[in-house]
Amino acid sequence: MVVGGGHAGVEAALAARRAGAVVTLVTLAPDAIGRMSCNPSIGGLAKGQLVREIDALGGLMGVAADATCMQFRMLNTRKGPAVQSPRAQVDREAYARFVRTALEATGGIELRRGQVAAIDHRGGRFEALRLTDGSRVSGDACVLTTGTFLRGLMHVGDRVSAGGRVGEAPASELSAALVELGFELVRLKTGTPPRLDARTVDLDGFEQVLGDPADGRFSFRIEPAPERRAVPSYRTATNARVHDIVRSNLDRSPYGRGVLEGTGPRYCPSLEDKVARFAERESHRVFIEHETASGPSLYLNGLSNCLPQDVQLQIVHALPGLESARMLRPGYAVEYDAVPAWQLRPTLETRTLEGLFLAGQINGTSGYEEAAAQGLMAGLNAARRAAGEAGVVLGRHEAYVGVLLDDLVTSSPREPYRMFTSRAEYRLLLRQDNAHRRLVPRARAWGLVTSAEACAVAELEGEIERLGCALSDEQRRRVRRGEGLAQVIGEASPPAVRGCYDEALQQLELDVRYAGYVERQARQVEKVAALAEVPLAEAVDYLAMEELKLEARQVLDRVRPVNLAQASRLAGVTASDLSLLALRSSRPARA
């Protein structure tokens, strides 16, 4: 069972099906499957790494983004490869159509319209979903991917309406069902900016932001569609007049009046928040982006707010070039229930109920990419649970997906979590360009990619090895000094596998150039791996371990880490606490 048809739900359903499960996807609105609720883009800083990893694990997001791309850019190209990230501006309507078509074309996935009212269980294990129409749908495991719909409330000025996003009803009863099961819930919030009618805007007066001239893509599995990549976006900024309008109307905003209960995303603040918190700033950057290749809707990236509609129109008209713009839809804030992720195991299965998994914004994350990555892993592990197989987890040294899940479960953020490259301590190992080399073998073992896809990556590895074996020490030194590998080897090493020769050159050049740093990070991974080999029993009574500090006992009792490595990342657990835990775990159990 999968509940929800957003980015997390789609990847959960597809991953579960590829792993051998028969899937029922329950959604409030089948026609809204794959809908991009906010910005019309996929990827971005660190998020692009997640999309590449989702693709390497057999997911759909990268394929869908490539098929509907209007502009592709590689970000951070002036910096090293560890922090470069791909981003695509996509046609949001075409993207949703592509996703739904792919889902419907996958045999073994049933789409069912409905809203969950209760969760049935027996003996501490998930058994069935009860829907508001009175029907009961049973299954061996379930993934909840409810997005912003749990008791969702939308705010525009002093107008409040129930809903998870504009035009769609909230999931009203599921929150109560989760509380009844013993889950702690928190209130979070997010927002979206106004949309404008492109026919009322002279875009020629704005600075254009163009895509990369070179062909780029997310997926290693399909060819891109370069003819769709000619749509520019545009750059502008707020000004003193905009800031004055915001300040004089803060008392009309739910933010200014303190009406909103939820905690918002720190790294994607509302316009009200930016003006109030950064009063010294004269302007804030705004990007104008097309939402579709054929429709008139423009997205104002950076202008998220929930001021009254008349005030939002004043703000838009205060921006040079938008004086005559017509607003298609005002921005709004949405607040919703989430489940703090300390209540989950690293597999995203809940500790409270066996067979119940959570993925996406219900776990306190923000962003399509973070949601999709969770959905894929939750769907895979739910299918494995249903088949009686052990769950699987990616380490922090193996993938950004591993960093994401570990951060959620271990630190349980108090605000909507978004991925950054700085969160990955082994980011040089986890480059966006080598995701398929890192993860396709794992994905093949889990049944997530085809043998042909795995063979293509194996051919690439063989070509990299062949080229690497032919390099002399002097050639390696030249590459490390910054010379291109293609120039170093010249024509001395013709391709053995023509289809992947150029990519093999690029990969080997990076492998050679950063070999010293990679080896250093590999040694760090080995040290952490030694801690990971020391398991901690789930039934340990940490509160009774008086030799530990009270703060350590409380956080250990709440998170219940699976090994010393996870315990070492908990705030409040010191080196001396770890030593005591290691000593305790090495003692033989009493009879």
Image (cartoon, helix red, strand yellow):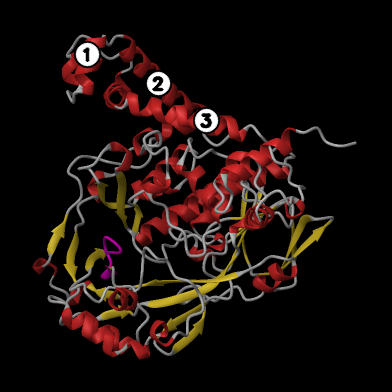
On the rendered image, what quadrant is the N terminus found in? bottom right
Q: Residue 487, position in %: x, y?
A: 16, 19
Task: Look at discs 3 and 2 and give the one toward the viewer.
Answer: 3
Q: Nearer the viewer, residue 298 or 520?
A: 520
Up the image or down, 146 lies above or below 215; here it is below
Decide if residue 524 is on the left or right side of residue 12. Answer: left
x, y percentage for residue 459? 40, 20
Residue corresponding to mark 2: 461
Q: Residue under circle 1?
A: 475
**Between discs 1 and 3, the one toward the N terminus:** 1
Q: CA distance from mark 1 to mark 3?
A: 32 Å
The quadrant of the rendering that contains the C terminus is top right
Residue 527's mark? 3
Q: Which residues are magenta?
A: 290-300
Q: Residues within 10 Å of mark 2 (few under 14, many from 20)?
A: some
Q: Is residue 443 left or right of residue 193?
A: right
Q: Earlier in the sequence, mark 2 or mark 1?
A: 2
Q: Is residue 555 left or right of residue 162?
A: right
Residue 202 visible? The answer is yes
Q: Nearer the viewer, residue 119 or 135?
A: 119
SS state under label 1: helix
**CA gap, disc 2 and disc 1:** 20 Å
Amino acid type of the residue that numbered disc 1 sits on in the rendered structure: Gln
